[in-house]
Amino acid sequence: MMNNFKFQNKTSIRFGKDRLEAELHDAIAQFGNNVLLVFGSGSIKKSGLYDRVMSLLSDMNVVELSEVSPNPKISSVRKGQTLVKNNDIDVILAVGGGSVIDAAKVIASSKFYDADPWELVVDSAKRQTIEQLPLVDILTLSATGTEMNTGSVISNPDTHQKLGTYGPKTPAVSFLDPQLTYSVSKWQTAAGSIDIFSHLTEQYFDNGANDVTSGIMEGLYRAVIKNAPIALAEPDNYDARATLMWAATMSLNGLTSVGNQNGWTVHPIEHELSAYYDITHGVGLGIMTPRWMKHALSDETLPRFAQFGRQVWGLTGTDKEVAQLAIQETFNWIKSLEVPTTLPEVGIIDDTYFQNMAESAVMVGYLNHEAYVTLQAADVVHLFEEA
Ligand code: NZQ
Ligand code: ZN
């Protein structure tokens, strides 16, 4: 049944080639002159984007926070909090992938919080009650959808936690120039594409799914499946990069979750892998997704898997044949992107933490009561063992 919903998204999307020169300055200046520039470990310096941005903002006060790592750590947010408070920052400019933008969003909230910002990650409800600085971003990697949603995922290595947190605002302005993703490595291109596929899967296999959003998602699935291999083979293929970029945004900006029950499964499980082993998010999803699908397929879920097989993979046959083949096609597509498909291949060679990770995934992700197919910790341990 379609649930009641409210849908609103205020992010101004500036999609396409070379818009920064004409638009970046004013997009930022509308909020003030004191800017915190947040970026990662050097890809934007290598590509020349850093110099381009700095020259466009030459009349502004720009303070920098660099070295935000993949699976961004709370230590970066803490540094950012000090900078936004001490420099009277008006607006944050995040230039990078999901990790940079995610960290920037929590830093944007932390200006209005006088204690450790990890408390804002653990308790999103608290974040909703405080202000958040406006955020402008220049996205350089197609994957997370963070450029048009309120979410962030922040890691705390001291506690082995990687948690989602939601602020009151989506980014104010997001620049999406597919050309900026030409330099993304094969590994990250594959991981990003699998992340998009997984966001769709988390929302498609839902007990409240409706025909409107299902149809939108089936189109998005097909776009990602077709274009990820093209982008891998031809990194500067504009149309493939553009399709992945817009598919990433559209798959997690709220549009495809309206009316749904939104019990996600593989993400909470993957976040445990990243929390304990710091692996690439999309690669972890690629390892776990086909295993989860096999586990989730039952008499009750068969019609949905059959629809997935027919509408997404173009398969024909009986429901059972199509459902099973669809899971195999999913595995084959992930493998064709040249990423690992087992845990040992990403360095996870023993089961030391499986029980802890499984219990945490069930608790954080409400897997035993909100998931599409509910899971107990023992089921999650079993999925880890199979992987
Ligand atoms: O740090 P730099 O030097 O920029 O290098 C990055 C990083 O090493 C590099 N990169 C980014 N753009 C590039 C580039 N290299 C060359 N050319 C470019 N144009 O790619 C590496 C990975 O970057 P990262 O930002 O970590 O990747 P991604 O965008 O996949 O973000 C992953 C993070 O987002 C979280 C994940 O858990 C993970 O922590 N997620 C956030 C979500 C959200 N906010 O809604 C939802 C997702 O499900 C996800 O959980
Ligand atoms: Zn994801």
Image (cartoon, grey):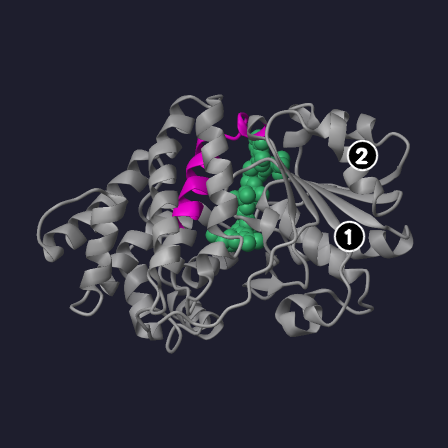
Which residues make up the magenta segment?
A: 180-198
Image location (x, y in percent) of residue 13: 63, 42
Asked if residue 288 shows in the view, the reply is: yes
Give the CA distance from mark 1 to mark 2: 22 Å
For the point 59% across and 66% down, the residue is: 159
357 relative position to 322: left or right: right
Classify mark 2: helix, strand or loop: helix
Residue 283 appears in the figure = no
Task: Tell me if residue 190 is in the magenta stretch.
Answer: yes
Q: Amino acid at mark 2?
A: His
- Residue placed farthest to the bottom in the image? 369
Kindly identify which residue carries mark 1: 80
Between 210 and 330, the one lying in front of the other is: 210
Query: What residue did someone put label 2 on?
Result: 25
The secondary element bearing badge 1 is classed as helix
Left or right: 265, with 96 as reference point: left
**Residue 244 in the image: above or below residue 81:** above
Other-residue count near label 1 (Cα within 10 Å), few / some / many at <14 / 14–19 / ≥20: many
Up/down of 162 relative to 178, above or below: below
Q: Look at the image and say whether residue 228 sits in the magenta stretch.
A: no
Indicate the position of residue 60 as horizontal and vertical percent values: 89, 36
Q: Mark 1: which amino acid?
A: Gly
Horizontal and vertical percent position of residue 21: 74, 26
**307 or 280, which lies in front?**
307
Q: Which residue is painted at 38% across and 56% down in the image?
A: 212
Q: Nearer the viewer, residue 387 or 298?
A: 298
Vertical placement of residue 4 versus 22, above or below: below
Mark found first going from the N terminus, 1 or 2:
2
Q: Residues within 10 Å of mark 2 (few under 14, many from 20)?
A: some
